[in-house]
């Protein structure tokens, strides 16, 4: 994990417990110090005139390339070819690399994020209804769903339970098809009509 700031007026403190910086003295008493868990911090400084404002942009990035599947219970012995790394591990080497990429593309990524928000809420429908229609797709941001290094999509029926992008769940998960059509199309071709297809019976046999 990494935390960086785009502000030029910044100070990095590898362990602020050993710092005499007044900005962090108030935190020293509230955060317990342990020998194996130093608390780092980044400080940005701005001098403001009356009614003046300033922005300080920070990036929190992480890199967790490995995929781990249960080896016991109903899925004992489950092996998934090519499932050793997440898809994004092909593009980044560590959390610092993710932070560097984000910093370099920051204006573009911010603009696209705000454009998505503005486009989504530019509707005659009330905001609470829009929120409710989009809640289910949040599943894709959990460990229910994975994208392997090969690009193949894989999902549990529930987190860690009932493996195999099971057809009685994912064949009628319409949000994926509408928001990420390429991912959905690949799932149909590579899973339903690929590893999950029984040519003898013509059956899509994943559960």
Image (cartoon, helix red, strand yellow):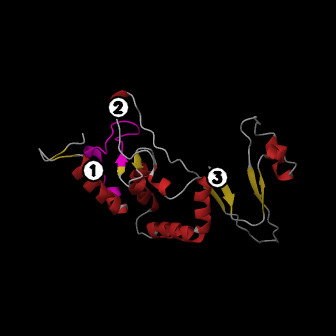
Q: Position of residue 115 (x, y in %)?
A: 50, 70
* Secondary structure state at the residue bearing disc 2: loop
Is label 3 or label 2 in front?
A: 2
Q: Residues within 10 Å of mark 2 (few under 14, many from 20)?
A: few
- Name above or below for residue 71 compared with residue 134: above
* Disc with the residue nearer the chain's start (1 vs 2): 2
Where is mark 2, residue-wise?
77
Q: Which residue is mark 1?
A: 191
Q: Is residue 142 above or below residue 124?
A: above
Which residue occupies the foreground of this view, 97 or 12?
A: 97
Residue 202 screen position, x and y as percent? 13, 47
For disc 3, the neighbor class at 10 Å (few under 14, some 14 to 19, many from 20) is some
| Res 2 label | 3
Q: Nearer the viewer, residue 92 or 35?
A: 92
Q: Quadrant of the C terminus?
A: top left
Please give the label number shown on residue 5: none
- Residue nearest the observer in this picture, 163 or 140: 163
Give the residue at x 81% y 49%: 24
- The residue that appears at 40% across and 31% down in the rendered structure is 71
Q: Which residues are magenta?
A: 154-176
């Amino acid at each position: 994990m990494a935390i960086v700031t785009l502000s030029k007026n910044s100070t990095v403190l590898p362990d602020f417990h050993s710092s005499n910086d007044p900005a962090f003295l108030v935190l020293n008493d509230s955060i317990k110090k342990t020998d194996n868990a130093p608390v780092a911090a980044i400080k940005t400084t701005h001098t403001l005139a009356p009614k003046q404002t300033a922005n300080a942009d920070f990036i929190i990035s992480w890199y967790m390339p490995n995929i781990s599947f249960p080896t016991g219970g109903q899925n004992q012995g489950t092996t998934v070819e090519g499932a050793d790394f997440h898809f994004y591990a092909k593009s980044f080497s560590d959390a610092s690399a993710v932070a560097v990429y984000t910093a370099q593309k920051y204006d573009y990524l911010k603009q696209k994020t705000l454009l998505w928000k503005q486009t989504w809420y530019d509707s005659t429908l009330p905001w609470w209804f829009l929120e409710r229609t989009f809640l289910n797709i949040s599943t894709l941001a959990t460990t229910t769903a994975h994208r392997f290094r090969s690009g193949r999509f894989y999902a549990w029926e529930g987190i860690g339970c009932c493996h195999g992008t099971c057809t009685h769940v994912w064949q009628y998960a319409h949000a994926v098809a509408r928001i990420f059509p390429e991912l959905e199309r690949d799932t149909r071709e590579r899973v339903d009509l690929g590893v999950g297809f029984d040519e003898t019976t013509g059956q899509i046999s994943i559960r």
